[in-house]
Image (tube, helix red, strand yellow):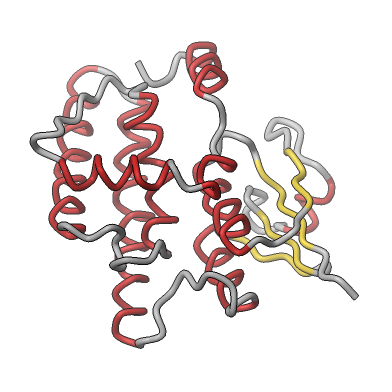
Amino acid sequence: MADEVILLNFWLSPYGMRVQIALEEKGIKYEYKEEDMSNKSPLLLQMNPIHKKIPVLIHNGKPICESLLAVEYIDEVWKDQSPLLPSDPHQRAQARFWANYIDNKVYEVALKLWKTKGEEKEAAMKELLECLKLLEEKLGDKLYFGGDKFGLVDVALVPLFCWLYTYNFSAILISEAEYPNIIAWAKRCTQRESVSKSFPEEHRVKSFLAEKGLGQ
């Protein structure tokens, strides 16, 4: 009997993009169900009754909530296909550390940037650039954060950075002279089919943000 895999998501969610990228990297067949976050479906409320948020991965009727947990679950269940975590325990712990840093620090600062104005926005922009500088140093001259292979840290960061680099919708001008590693990494990641298939069209994102008055 084939696995039944369903992803409950909202098309612009960077968290949902992570789960999509992981599924695409593994070549897993799944059903995508778009959620209206102003009118959440009974299935979403049933599968994530605590937070009532997307994304939710449903595997054979069982839900996995929170994007990084879902990505790790995918990697563990379909472990023989394009592994996202290294086999070495220390390297695996390091990957989880940086993925959590991106989740709890970088995304938090980015949300401040998109939702604030004036001095508060300028402070958030400075803080985000400091985070990116740290990640620039961490990446170094490697192809991906884990070395030669696309992995968990890349999956965690790429949706956010694709917004910043591809759309530049927060008016952040990231200098290639200052961030050569990150910019090369972003270009490399967006050329992966798993990323390009999971990422929405630029015009659709810009229209949505303009309508909501975000990212200016």
- Residue 55 position, x and y percent, is 63, 51
Q: Which residue sits furthest left?
A: 177
In this view, the residue in front, 211 or 172, is 172
- The quarter of the rendered structure image containing the N terminus is bottom right
Comparing 147 with 50, the one in front is 147
Count every numbered label the image shows and give the total.
0
Residue at the outermost right position:
1
31, 53: nearer the viewer:
31
- For image coordinates 64% across by 38% down, the residue present is 10
In-image side of 142 versus 115 (left or right): left
* 136 left or right of 5 in image: left
At horizontal 21% and vertical 58% (from top left) the residue drawn is 139
Q: For this view, does 66 lie left or right of residue 171?
A: right
- Residue 78 in the image: state x and y as whole percent: 63, 75
Point 50% across, 73% down: residue: 83
Residue placed farthest to the bottom in the image? Answer: 89
Q: Please, is residue 108 above or below residue 68 in the view? A: above
In the rendered image, the vertical position of residue 96 relative to residue 103, given as above or below: below
Residue 5 position within the rendered picture, expressed as x and y whole percent measured from the top left: 77, 61
| Quadrant housing residue 101 | bottom left
Residue 147 quadrant = bottom left
Residue 54 is situated, as x and y percent measured from the top left of the image, at 63, 48
User: In terms of depth relative to the viewer, which is nearer, 150 or 216?
Assistant: 150
Quarter of the figure with residue 138 = bottom left
Residue at the location (43% across, 41% down)? 190
Specify the quadrant that holds the C terminus: top left
